[in-house]
Image: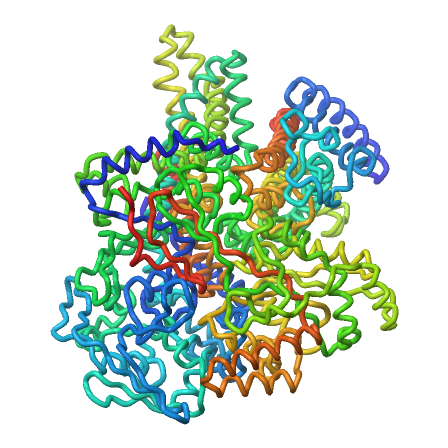
Amino acid sequence: MSIFSTRFLAASALALMAAAPLHAKTFVYCSEGSPEGFDPAPYTAGTTFDASGHAIYNRLVQFKPGTTEIEPALAESWEVSEDGLTYTFHLRKGVKFHSNDKFTPSRDFNADDVIFTFNRQANADDPWHAYISGITYEYYSSMEMDKLVKSIEKVDDNTVKFTLNSPEAPFLANVAMPFVSVVSKEYADTLQAAGTMEDLNNAPIGTGPFKFVAYQKDAVIRYQKNADYWGEAPKIDDLVFAITPDASVRLQKLKAGECHLMPYPAPADLADIKADPNLKLDEQAGLNVGYLAYNTTVAPFDKPEVRKALNMAMDKKALIDAVYQGNAEVAKNPIPPTMWSYNAAIEDDKYDPEAAKKMLEDAGVKDLTMEVWAMPVQRPYMPNARRAAEIIQSDFAKVGVKVEIVSYEWGEYLKKSMEAGRKGAVILGWTGDNGDPDNFLSVLLSCASAEEGGANRAFWCNDEFSALLAKAKASSDQAERTKLYEEAQVIFKDQAPWATLAHSTQYVPMAKNVTGFVQSPLGDYTFETVDLAE
Amino acid sequence: MLKFILSKLLYLIPTMLGITLVAFSFIRLLPGDPVLLMAGERGVSPERYAEISAQLGYDKPLWQQYFTYLGDLMHGDLGHSIVTKKPVLAEFLALFPATVELAVVAIIIATVIGVPVGVIAAIKRGSWFDQISMTGALIGFSMPIFWWGLLLIIFFSGILQWTPVSGRISLMYFFPQVTGFMLIDSLISGQKGAFGSALGHLILPSVVLATIPLAVIARQTRSAMLEVMGEDYVRTAKAKGLSLGRVIGVHALRNAMIPVITTIGLQIGVLMAGAILTETIFSWPGIGKWMIDSISRRDYPVVQSGLLLIAGIVMIVNLLVDLTYGLINPRIRHK
Amino acid sequence: MSDTSVKISDSAIRRRMLKEFWFYFSQNRGAVVGFAVFLLLVALAIFAPLIAPHDPVHQYRDALLVPPFWQEGGRPEFLLGTDAVGRDMLSRLIYGAQYSLFIGIVVVAIALLGGIILGLLAGFFGGWVDSVIMRVMDVILAFPSLLLALVLVAILGPGLTNAMIAIAIVYQPHFARLTRAAVMGEKAREYVTAARVAGAGNMRLMFKTILPNCLAPLIVQATLSFSSAVLDSAALGFLGMGAQPPASEWGTMLAEAREFILRAWWVVTFPGLAILISVLAINLMGDGLRDALDPKLKRS
């Protein structure tokens, strides 16, 4: 039982009530990190997107809350040409940008803003391309928008036409991502004239559900409801992000009533949260996978049967209990079950050390010593890689394979794990960017991604598998794509370049009186729908 | 006196230069690459890698980077953070008041408690007060403060619920940051209860941070007092029949304070180290936590200039201590 | 003055010093207690394999986070409970003593050796050698020790060995300064001049003649550094930069335990207590040493 009893809440509830007249309805979110900045384009962290892209801005299209389906946002509708090369977006009319003490918009949102949003990232000659020294547009290039988009044209004030170099089914999902949040061209012009371009990053102006009020570094971000919001207006008046990096401290604050909702609880605390009558816990399968990637180019891991045998020696259930405290699902496929095209028919390798031992002997593997790499950081898909490696170590010992656990500093780890000829197997994982299966399979397992600078840490290049992916990418028929991806998963399972470990569950603890929070499968935290019951 | 100050300042220059070199070269020796960290699990193509490196200036030879850095320093440019892209100096100034506030309150706690305890322990040498307080001081001196902080959180925030868990002030209060010091800003704001809230948030972290300096000051005061009280002129004063209070107040204390002030001053470096741990435990938005985060993110410019700024501050404080010492103890000045 | 006569008087002095030292040291009750605890720690460390009831890294998968035996749900085979992966706390704490003593010894040895050499060079030769060495020491001392150690560990890579090296580097300026000051004081004395006249070389002068006469302050500083090294390495471990799991280093154990602060008090409390007790014991000893050596320092 928890030592933090209800007294905690009673006291703080009083405190909150006392403050109520001061701020009408204030919602406090205990976020886990500081935003890198408030311009959503140059940054890559989820915390930044929650604080900027999702709260302050909108995009042409958006993910329907709680899903990875696309729905209209700043674009009311769109058409895709037969050949899949042209996308025409019809923009919403009467959308107002926010104002602050230095800027009041004189016009509504229009096509110029959309073109500005994309061009400043695409075009190195744009004065806004490097408006802060050292700035880069990581997502724009890593989603390969630079290679994909041929041109963007303004057809009229409310119509924009994108022409692509090749048909690309995930394009729509890409433009729903936070890095292409639409910024105001008029605001940018004003800042440029005033010589305070960096304010685009410090004092953001968007069209989103919340207006930016103030940021105190590493401590608090404050927002106000956007009364002129084009969509359904938020139900809370003020939104506060209380930046609290430590998970146990976040929980204590939640229990003390100092905040209403928090991300990423420590797995160890979940039982306690469930038992607390003043809290509730929302859970959803995360869009992620944690895996152990063998180096399929180095003997004896170049033999599928060796990889398969090792997979069978692994007690994934025990691993999930110890590493995820049971809060994950055993993974059998490289994509999570909540993603469309997940092949549920595939059967996972059985945990059977005896059979595994025999398979290894049959394959002529004796006295094998291998490295298992444990990443030095925590990720939602892998809360404690070191512990996972220790469990794999003791499991493999049972089939006569000696494991040496190695770890490097995170940057080194990422680099060394992609060095060709790497010894040993690497623990790593992936969280989806946009809910498209291509975002998992192509990024992590295609032949192209096995090249230098890719992310295929098994160095696994299977022509049949890659061909299926390429075919699926060019098609805009979802049923056809689903079939192709399902087939690809069969090949993956058969070849076993990874040991798929787990899909972790996302938990969102919140106060009992919080209503309307919708968990995003992409791990975003958005608050336009939340409310506080009296 | 002026000559004394000048010579001390001149002495600082080679050390400062050494510090820039150390900070710069340390950072270049760090394994791990900020460009790769930015790319994360996804990886980055060789062309893109070269492009970003060039943009950040990492493709130039090291000596050239160093001189560019020194040149920028002369212009007051301490570089931009790779992560936030903001000027390092701006970030430092945004976070520094939080650390100063914490450190100042800690040193006040340590002095206000440590000095009287040391004095009384010295006067009543061998008494139960002396023994208990000095045992306490030794325990404080031996305390792993990161653990101590966790225990205090469990006890005061958890079981007793007297203190808030983390942060600098309750989120109910929102007012402009005039000075950056929450205690002062909350008073200026005039909002009812704001000052109390700020104080409540400050109490646990500053107690944790004060623990080691408090122990050191108490021990130092006691031994300085004992030494002074053994000296002839105090004994003479006592023999002359002056009251004990007067002997201690006027003669012993004043002389005993000289080494104590030095000790207090020298705790600044200890406090900076302690701030790293304290800020980490209490999620205190100060420069200690900022440095730790930046080291783990391989934010080169921040670590480099942050080290420089912190070392510079420690040195300036030490210089001030030296000068004060010179002022109250003329013997040094004339040497 | 012949060689042998120097030696005899040397050892005679040493014996008398030792006796006097023990007399003063044993006067201090705290120091004796500290010494006893320290001996106990040494015994625990040496005989850990015999004393510890379990293998410190063995995971009992059916016994995750079992509380200490006196608490409800506790099990007699795990006296102080188990951690998140089912390892016996008591055994880990006992083995942890090995780490702490090892760290203390290695750090002090490296720092002492480096500091003495640099201090001797600086003090003995003076001039630009002195200036360069002492400026470098100033630079090191200008950084808060833990911060510098952190950056050094980040450079060298997290791990026990590197943490020890980093801490030793941060500590050695203290030894260098002490040695230098002592050497400067001793250099002008008669016995040094006499030895020089007798034809002793620089090396001999530095190490055989001067050094033994400045040992007292170095010993006191070494004890202080020993306890600081245990504290700082635990702090590094706590910040994830010291010994790496599954090592049962106390600071690392605390770091791993932090997420269980609300749920399992024992995994947080015991490692910290172990750190406190051992540091306290060493500091008590240090106080006794200083008191015992001090009178001689004053008299000489």
Residue C236 x %, y %:
58, 48
Q: Quadrant of residue B209?
A: top left
Residue B76 in sight from this viewpoint: no
Residue B248 in sight from this viewpoint: yes
Number of disc labels = 0
Taking depth in this image into account, of A479 and A446 the one nearest to the observer is: A479
Residue A365 x %, y %:
85, 70
Residue at 15%, 65% in the rendered image: A102
For residue B80, above or below residue B202: below
Q: Viewed as shown, does residue B98 lie left or right of A468?
A: left
For residue C111, above or below residue A156: above
Residue A407 x %, y %:
65, 61
For residue C164, above or below residue B45: above
Taking depth in this image into account, of B179 and B248 the one nearest to the observer is: B179
Residue that sits furthest to the top in the current view: B241
Residue at 51%, 51% in the rendered image: C147
Considering the image in quadrants, where does the N terminus of chain B appear?
A: top left
Q: Viewed as shown, does residue C65 lie left or right of A124?
A: right
Taking depth in this image into account, of B90 and B65 the one nearest to the observer is: B90
Residue at 52%, 43% in the rendered image: A269
Residue that sits furthest to the left in the current view: A106
Residue B257 x %, y %:
40, 28
Taking depth in this image into account, of B16 and A393 the one nearest to the observer is: A393
